[in-house]
Structure formats: C-alpha cells, structure tokens
Image (spheres, rainbow, N blue to C red):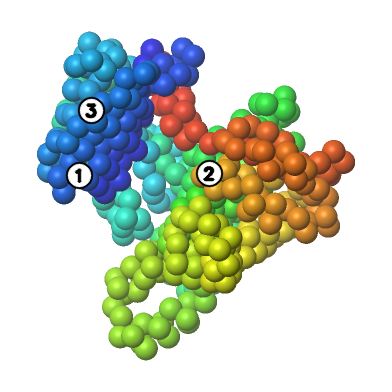
Amino acid sequence: MKILVVNAGSSSLKYQLMNMEDESVIAKGNCERIGIDGRITHIAGDKKIEKDTAFPSHTEAFMSVVDALTKGEAAVISSMDEVGAVGHRVVHGGEIYFDTTRVTDEVIDKIDQLSELAPVHNPAHALALRACKSVIPESVPQAVVFDTAFHATIPKKAYIYGMPYEFYEKYNVRKYGFHGSSHSFVTKMLALHLGKDISSMKIVSCHLGNGSSITAVDGGRSVDTSMGFTPLDGILMGTRSGAIDPSAVTYMMKKLNLSPSEMENVLNKESGLLGIGGFSDNRDLTAAMNDGDKKAELASDILRYGIIKYIGAYAAVMNGLDYVIFTGGIGENAADVREGVCENMEYLGIKLDKTVNSASRGELKRISAEGSKAEVWVVPTNEELLIARSTRELFGL
C-alpha cells in the first residue's frame, strides 16, 4: 500500500511516495518557484529528472507531480489509483484541530481562516489542498496532520499569556507550539530504539534548523515548548528573532516608523543568526567564526545559550531529565553546537563523549559518555514518515 506525503509552502511543494509495507521511499521530489516560473526535481531510485516548467499555481505543480509519478522514465506507478491515500502537513490547526483529519472543503476553509495565526504557512497549505483535491481522484482519501496537534497536551498554565484573558477568549491568543510532528517522531523513535515505555521517560527534544524549537516531553506528552502563538517565539533561529521583550518591538516600531507588517518582516526575515551574525545558515556562520568573525561568534553563542536555558527550564518543569535529543538540520549535523550546549551541564548529570559526538552526522546515536545520568542522543527526524503513518491509521489502511 502506497501513501503520498505532501508538504506545501507558498512557492514550493515537496512530496514523497512511500511504500507502507516496509516504510521505504519509492519516489520523492520538489516543485519550486510556484507562481514565478517553475522547476520540478523528481527522484526515483537512481533516476533523477529535473525540468523547468510553468507553475502559475499549485494546481499545475500537482499536475506535474502526477505526471512525474505516472509517466516517463522515472515513473513508479501506472496511475494515481495505485495510491491508497494522501497525507498533508499543515502548520497551524488552532484550537480546532488536534488530530489527523480527513480533508473536506470545510476543513480547507477553516485552515484558510486560521491564516492570521500562521500567515507564512496556512495560506499556502490551503492553496495546495484545494489544488490537490482538484487533481487527485476522489477515490483517494486525503488527510491533514497538524504541527500544533502534538502540543494539545500542554497545560493551560503553560499556554495562557499574561494578557487580558479576553484576548484568549475572543481572539485565541495563546501558545500553540510547532514542529509537533518532528518532536513526536523522534521521542517515539528513541523509546522504540531503547525498548522503553515512553510513559516513563522525561525528554527534552531539541529540533534545531533554520526554524528551531525545544519541547519538554514528559511520559510521551508535550508539556511545554519554546515556540508560542507563532513560530517566531523561543530561541534564536536562522532569520527569526526568537523571544524578545515586547516593548523592544514597539520601541523600534516608533523609532523607525514601521507598520505592524513591516515589523513582522524584520522579526521573521531579517533577525536571528542573520541579523546578528550576517548569515542565516549555521554552516556559513561556523565558517565565518573560524575566520575570526566576532559577530558570527556572538550569534552562535546566543543560539547555544538559548538552548541551554530551555533544557534547564524544562528539566525543572518535568522535575527531572532522562534524555536530551538533538534533531533537525543543525541538531543532527552540527557537532560543535551540540558540544557547546552540553559542555557545562554537569549539574543535570550530562557528560558528553566528545569523540563520538564529533563523528556523529545524521544517524541515530548516543553521544553522551558512560556514566552520564541524563543520556544525550542524536535522533534523525522523519516528519514525512510520521505523516504517512498517521494517514494510514486514520483511514485504517
């Protein structure tokens, strides 16, 4: 049985066709520059197809995906009828959706209505869902998996902000949390690998990439997370500021005469590692540090410091700490960041094996030393696989 997993952005559409019998990837690809000009990259086994093609909208992109899967030298199925279901990633479900949900016109409309809460992501998801629904046969059921769903277990004392309560009641202003699919996948994967019951484990999961979030997972349940009302909150990120005094925001809006949308752009696209160190990619930042760039060094220090603070805070929240997980592009590959976070955390019982850590890149591996009370692991994330599994479970396939 095959499931197609779709992750749509405002100008891109990534996909994977998965064989759920062994959970292998049959084919994958990416449609880029939707609404600009268009390019599709499709990979099936040792065959790779790259083609410039017009993508005025997500509909044309989906048509190209169907063609890539069913036609030409890199085709892997004869028709879309061979696909058992389609699973979509959607960033924000608000207080409406906490479970994997069947796609209907009403569901798509509600996802679109939540765009104020995720203006960068949800509009693109709604466009893609409508496009996919118009292209994929009606006989193929479709599901949406929400990034916010895993954090539905966060207690009210952790998700309510210190603002007038009516802001929550009338406008749904609260902490939602993101990267839920990733945090859910890696914590379950570690428990499975260790042969342990996740209900007895206290884990801090660090998803570190261009967007980063830290989550306290107590007994398999998210009890707090660093991202909040939007994915802007928390630690320093590639171009996002992370947590900041609200008065600093209003102060600079007055100083520079910025509108709310202009200030949102500054905080989301011109801040973070880029705003401080001049580079949004951690690899470029590291190279600049090695060349003696002091601002790049400062940006990296702020990133590591922020991660350390959240790990310590979440150990306190859970009244203990058994495991720290590093995942995501930076978490899985940046040994220097992991070492910088763990080198002064003996008070939590963390002792890093620097040799093992230095050699670890993108593989499931314990990087803490023997005798470390809290174990530290690198666990590669696979959000697509979690979406496929959730879709299969919803439809009983």
Query: Crowding near pointer 1: few (<14 within 10 Å), some, many (20+)?
Result: many
Alpha carbons under labels 1 and 3: distance apart: 13 Å
Badge 2 is on which residue? 328
Q: Earlier in the sequence, mark 2 or mark 3?
A: 3
Under circle 2, the secondary element is helix
280 shown above or below 195: below
Q: For the point 32% across and 20% down, which residue is it?
A: 47
Q: Which residue is rendered at x = 53% and y = 44% of the image?
A: 328
Q: Secondary structure at mark 3?
A: helix
Q: Is residue 132 left or right of residue 337?
A: left
| First in residue order: circle 1 vs circle 3 | 1
The disc at residue 34 is 1
| Labelled disc at residue 65 | 3
In the figure, 261 relative to 119: above or below? below
- SS state under label 1: loop
Residue in the foreground of this view, choosing between 390 and 107:
390
Q: Where residue 201 appears, x then y in whole percent?
A: 73, 38
- Distance between the alpha carbons at the discs numbered 1 and 2: 25 Å
Task: Indicate the position of residue 145 as horizontal and vertical percent values.
Answer: 40, 36
| Residue 56 in view of the camera | yes
Number of callouts in the render? 3
In the picture, the quarter occupied by the N terminus is: top left
The residue furthest right is: 371
**Image quadrant in which the C terminus is located:** top left
